[in-house]
Image: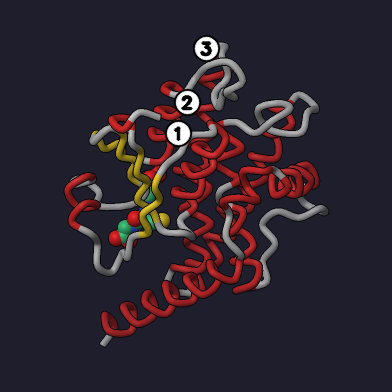
Amino acid sequence: MAAKEYLKLLGIDVSPFAIGVHMALVMKGVNYEYIAEDLSNKSELLVSSNPVHKNVPVLIHSGNPICESLVIVQYVDEFFTGAGVPSILPADPYERAIARFWAAYVDDKFFPAMAGIVLVPTEQKRVQKVKETSAAIELLEEAFTVCSKGKAFFSGDSIGYVDLALGSLLIWIETIRRMCGLEIISASKTPRLAAWAERFGETAAAKKVVPEADQALQYGKKLQAAVSAAATSKSK
Ligand SMILES: N[C@@H](CCC(=O)N[C@@H](CS)C(=O)NCC(=O)O)C(=O)O
């Protein structure tokens, strides 16, 4: 890659959003520099590259910052093309629209419900988040059946856009299982997604990028403690 096409990815190792972008870059076979951020002390580069949200991931390509993981994955897919380079989004416009729809559903509905299970301050709210998560994953099981058309992944024989969106959350699905014993994806309730999750974990990109679940567990416990402390100090 020419020097002007230098790529930097700002992330944190356990961020599901950064994991999806990492995997997209690995799938495309491009070289990039990964810069691990400390979200309690954000770098000047992060704040100036993503002044609106100040969050990770940010991809900086030839000096141009691109923010929001799904936007970044689309950009990477559109920029890095060519013989032997896999496509992440389908070529057919209707299938692309469907893939974008389900990836947005994962981000806008499934993820906030799932994260809420460990981050909401009261038991009543937690029960609500568990219900929302179960409903969302059941819908995603149906979406998988329709989108995969009997193949291994949402996008067919290899991982694509929706696979990255949901697959990058698997580390946190496992973390929630360890933190509160809840199986969001299970062979009994969501058998197709359970088998898909196994296959996803075996892909070269996942093996290269996804960290050990223990790392997310430590991070999850810290986040949960911070949320509890904030709720306690508010109620005083
Ligand atoms: N919608 C964003 C979400 C990114 C996000 O929430 N990133 C978190 C880390 S997982 C973050 O950087 N949070 C900033 C903070 O905690 O201050 C995306 O898809 O990129």
Using the rendered view, name the quadrant where residue 144 is placed.
Answer: top right
The mark found on residue 77 in the picture is 2
Residue that sits furthest to the bottom in the current view? 236
- Residue placed under numbered mark 1 in the picture: 73
Residue drawn 71% across the image and 33% down it: 153
Residue drawn 34% across the image and 41% down it: 59
Q: As shown in the figure, which amino acid type bears the numbered disc 2?
A: Asp
**Could you tell me residue 95's position as x and y percent?**
58, 17
**Could you tell me residue 18's position as x and y percent?**
44, 49
Which of marks 3 and 1 precedes in the sequence?
1
- Residue placed under numbered mark 3 in the picture: 93
Q: As shown in the figure, which amino acid type bears the numbered disc 3?
A: Pro
- Quadrant occupied by the N terminus: top left
Q: Are marks 3 and 2 in contact (CB under 8 Å)?
A: no
**Could you tell me residue 233's position as x and y percent?**
27, 84
Which of marks 2 and 3 precedes in the sequence?
2
**Could you tell me residue 204's position as x and y percent?**
67, 43
**Cα distance, mark 1 to mark 3?**
17 Å
